[in-house]
Image (cartoon, rainbow, N blue to C red):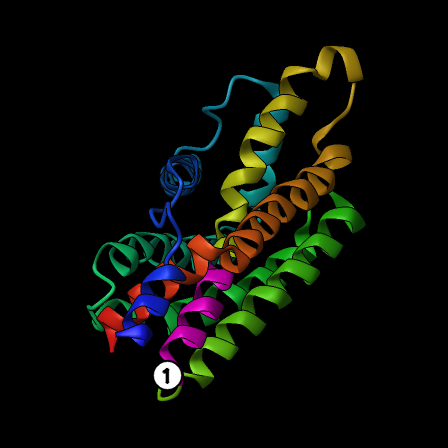
Amino acid sequence: MDKALSEISVVPKNAQTPAWLRVWFWACIVIAVAVVCRRIFALAHPGQATRSQMAALDQAFASHAILTLAHILPALAFVLLVAFFYIRPGAIWPERFLFPLGLVVGITAYAMSVYAVGGWAEWSAVLFFNSLFLFSLGRSWSQRYGDPQLKLRWMTRAIAVLLGIATTRPVMGIFFATNRLTHLEPRQFFGIAFWIGFSINTIIVELWLRSPQGRFQIERMAGSVS
């Protein structure tokens, strides 16, 4: 009886994931899918952009179209599977695809960084956060037959880093919108946007994972998986 009461007492009063965090998660999913679809369209129909800066970016990605597709198509599949991963935590099949897809995304991200639009600033952001993504993915993989909570925590960290590419888009939008005032070009602000976007995702999810609500949600999801 005392044990049962003690277990109830540690359950957070508001054990539900905060609404803003759920909105942010789904917004990242939608933005990431939209970004990939837009890039695929730009590769298939070059020269459609009306703004000179966007046209220059499209041309830059078109110069290594095969590598771009090898990166964004697995990334698109990864993002779509992430939705199933959290909606149906007891389903095993999404997880089986997330690991190989994540590995491909990570390897091709290193290759894409050779053509970094934002120079060394973007390259350093990709190097740091992509390494963090692969490290987190690897830690989750190492627990596939071990602790389900630990596996889920590291997978959540990996997913947060990957979805950082979606958070960079609003940041880039601000730079594009204020271009007439700042006179900054994409090569000057892409790296800054990458650092800001990926850092926001990484910090938010890490704080949530360490919160009582986050620990409770991970424990509950891991219980449904096991």
Magenta stretch: residue 111 in it?
no
Residue at screen point 60% across, 57% down: 112
Task: Look at the magenta stretch and give its main secondary structure.
Answer: helix
Q: Quarter of the image containing the C terminus?
A: bottom left
Residue 209, given in percent of the width and then of the height, sits at 50, 58
Of 221 and 173, nearer the camera is: 221
**Badge 1: how crowded within 10 Å, few (<14), some, or many (20+)?**
some
Asked which quadrant contains residue 75, the reply is: bottom left
Left or right relative to 2: residue 169 = right
Above or below 213: residue 96: below
- Residue 98 seen by the camera: yes
Residue 50, given in percent of the width and then of the height, sits at 52, 17
Can you name the residue that lies furthest to the front here?
2
Asked which quadrant contains residue 144, the reply is: bottom left
Q: Which kind of residue does numbered mark 1 sit on?
A: Arg
Of 144 and 49, nearer the camera is: 144
Residue 224, given in percent of the width and then of the height, sits at 22, 69
Residue at screen point 44% across, 35% down: 42
Residue at screen point 37% across, 43% down: 29
Of 23 and 51, nearer the camera is: 23
Asked which quadrant contains residue 57, the reply is: top right
Residue 94, given in percent of the width and then of the height, sits at 26, 67
Residue under pointer 1: 144
**Residue stretch in magenta:** 147-159
Above or below 61: residue 215: below
Residue at screen point 36% across, 37% down: 30
